[in-house]
Image (spheres, helix red, strand yellow):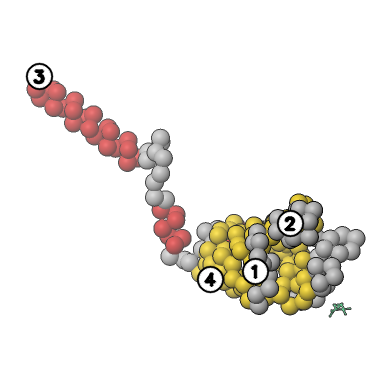
Amino acid sequence: MASLLKITLTITFYFIISSSLLHPATGVFSEEASEAISMRRMEKTTRLHFFFHDIHSGKSPTAIKIAGTPDSSLFGDTFMMDNALTEGQNASSKAVGRAQGMYAFAAKKEPALLMVVNFDFTKGEFNGSSISVLWRNPVMVDVREMPIVGGSGRFRYASGYALAHTVWFDPKTGDAIVEYNAYVKHY
Ligand SMILES: *[C@@H]1O[C@H](CO)[C@@H](O)[C@H](O)[C@H]1NC(C)=O
Ligand SMILES: *[C@@H]1O[C@H](CO)[C@@H](O)[C@H](O)[C@H]1NC(C)=O
């Protein structure tokens, strides 16, 4: 009787162990994925250089005001954009993607923006890949740094930073061209 119980317990124990080893995904909330381990070893850094065209004027503006206060203060003014990204400073140079997202004047004492943007690329091996940026942008500062918080496609697991520098600004319309240098760590 005692040995039968022992055998039953052993079999039950073996069954529990083997089923949890063979089917770790069944009903398991989190587990280490081996794919991620091998991908970590192939980490690389890609430098991206492009120009961003923030166009408020003309018949087809790519940045439009969607909210704001009626007073003259900029604080609270919010814009939606689908801005062109090009290889050169000239807007008619080769397109490399779009910057889609929102920005809002988030500081009361200076023109500093909260920006939430996906840079969606269309060129070469990065066609269809994107990087995501969540960022404080004090627009009057010569070189602004922004954190890259994620990405998709070739930029899956992206992290890194980008530097932005305004190369042209028209105070009458608000149109601007901004040069970007991004250093993207990905796999
Ligand atoms: C941009 O390129 C177009 C066509 O190549 C050219 O006509 C135009 O003068 C250029 N604009 C600037 C600002 O360089
Ligand atoms: C990017 O990919 C899309 C969808 O696969 C394709 O239609 C488009 O022609 C590609 N563009 C470039 C510049 O390769």
What residue would you read off at disc 2?
A: 77
Badge 2 marks a residue whose secondary structure is loop
Q: Type of residue at label 3?
A: Met
The answer as to whether callout 1 falls within 8 Å of ligand 1 is no
Whole-number angstrom distance, CA of label 3 to CA of label 1: 79 Å
Would you name the residue on which mark 1 appears? 138
Q: Earlier in the sequence, mark 1 or mark 4?
A: 4
Q: Is mark 3 within 8 Å of ligand 2?
A: no
The picture places residue 66, in percent across and down from the top left corner, at 77, 52
Q: Amino acid at mark 2?
A: Asp
- Secondary structure under the numbered disc 1 in the rendered image: strand
Residues packed near mark 3 inside 10 Å, few (<14), some (14 to 19) or many (20 plus): few
Q: Residue furthest right?
A: 59
Query: In terms of image quarters, where does ligand 1 lie?
Result: bottom right
Depth-wise, is mark 2 or mark 3 nearer the camera?
Answer: 2
Instruction: Check residue 1 in the rendering and tell me which mark sits there, or answer none.
Output: 3
> In the picture, residue 5 is in which quadrant?
top left
Image depth: mark 4 or mark 3 in front: 4
Of tags 1 and 4, which is closer to the observer? 1
